[in-house]
């Protein structure tokens, strides 16, 4: 056991844990689904990579390395897909704070593609991004 | 495992515990299904990190296959929940012209939609911001 590598691995693990904590603070404090998702994806990719590198340094053996790389690859492949689906659902069902958006090109593109704003049952129409 | 490395890892465990508590706060408060889905994703990430820390602390590799399973579980869970929320929240605002508009060319219905939205002034945008967290 190399004590220096032990400490390097522990520092990487600590970085991953701090990213998890930052994501949790963002989840509690941010105002809507998209911004919360922005915070929540940090530990899913970068934080997980830090954690896996930390474990690899701490274990100091080649046997678990393949499985650790598998975890990293799976997470890097699947996190964008699920984030895309959640964001798409949030936008299409109107769970996005329009007043927080600086630019909303998707509204123009959707209108051009033949989609239209449904007249909401009780909440009225929301945004107009034509100007 | 040297003492210094153990101390650093225990500090990380404290961060993870705080992260889990805050994430559970968001999961209970909601307000929408998608917020809870995102919080569940973070819970899975925190659990993976906790398993990794335990493996590093005790120098064993028993929990590493569980990390593989968890990374796939979070993916399947959030995907299916997003589809479920999309199907359920039909009160949403973006509709396909073919699905709900009276039969007409999609181009003309888009034009009509734009004109209708322009007739409602910016007051409607203010109205939208009064319902920041619409739906459930």
Image: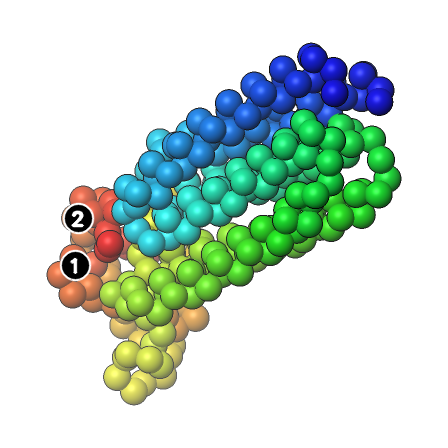
User: Horizontal and vertical percent for residue A103?
Assistant: 41, 46
Q: Nearer the viewer, residue A82 or A125?
A: A82
Say which quarter of the image contains residue A31.
Answer: top left
Above-or-below relation of B133 to A22? below
User: Horizontal and vertical percent for residue A14?
Assistant: 62, 24
Residue, x 52% and y 45% (percent of image)?
B44
Above-or-below relation of B7 to A110? above
Residue, x 34% and y 76% (percent of image)?
B97
Q: Nearer the viewer, residue B119 or B2?
A: B2
Q: Which mark is residue A94?
A: none
Q: Locate the C terminus of chain B by quadrant.
A: bottom left
Q: How is the image coloured?
A: rainbow
Circle 1/circle 2 CB separation < 8 Å: yes
Say which quarter of the image contains residue A89.
Answer: bottom left
Q: Chain of mark 2?
A: B
| B14 on left or right of A103 | right
| B75 on left or right of B68 | left
Q: Nearer the viewer, residue A19 or B74?
A: B74
Most distant residue in the top direction: B4
User: Horizontal and vertical percent for residue B12?
Assistant: 57, 23
Structural distance between the alpha carbons of marks 1 and 2: 8 Å
| B93 on left or right of A111 | left
Q: What residue would you read off at disc 1?
A: A124
User: Horizontal and vertical percent for residue B68?
Assistant: 66, 51
Q: What residue would you read off at disc 2?
A: B127
Q: Locate the N terminus of chain B by quadrant.
A: top right
Residue, x 38% and y 77% (percent of image)?
B107
Say which element carries label 2.
helix
């Amino acid at each position: 056991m190399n004590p220096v590598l032990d400490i390097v691995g522990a520092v990487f693990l600590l970085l991953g844990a701090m990213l998890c904590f930052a994501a949790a603070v963002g989840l509690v404090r941010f105002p809507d689904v998209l911004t919360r998702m922005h915070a929540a994806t940090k530990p899913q990719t970068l934080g997980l990579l830090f954690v896996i590198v930390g474990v690899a340094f701490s274990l100091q053996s080649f046997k678990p390395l393949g499985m650790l790389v598998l975890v990293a690859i799976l997470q890097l492949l699947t996190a964008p897909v699920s984030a895309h689906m959640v964001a798409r659902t949030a936008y299409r069902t109107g769970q996005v704070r329009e007043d927080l958006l600086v630019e909303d090109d998707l509204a123009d593109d959707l209108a051009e593609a033949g989609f239209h704003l449904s007249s909401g049952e009780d909440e009225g129409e929301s945004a107009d991004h034509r100007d | 495992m040297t003492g210094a490395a153990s101390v650093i890892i225990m500090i990380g465990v404290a961060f993870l515990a705080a992260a889990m508590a805050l994430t559970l706060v968001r999961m209970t408060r909601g307000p929408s299904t998608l917020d809870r889905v995102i919080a569940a994703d973070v819970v899975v990430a925190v659990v993976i990190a906790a398993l990794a820390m335990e493996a590093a602390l005790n120098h064993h590799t028993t929990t590493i296959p569980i990390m593989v399973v968890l990374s796939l579980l979070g993916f399947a869970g959030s995907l299916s929940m997003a589809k479920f929320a999309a199907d359920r929240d039909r009160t949403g605002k973006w509709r396909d012209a073919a699905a709900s508009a009276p039969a007409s060319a999609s181009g003309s219905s888009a034009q009509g939609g734009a004109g209708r939205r322009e007739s409602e002034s910016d007051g409607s945008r203010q109205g939208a911001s009064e319902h920041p967290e619409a739906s459930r």
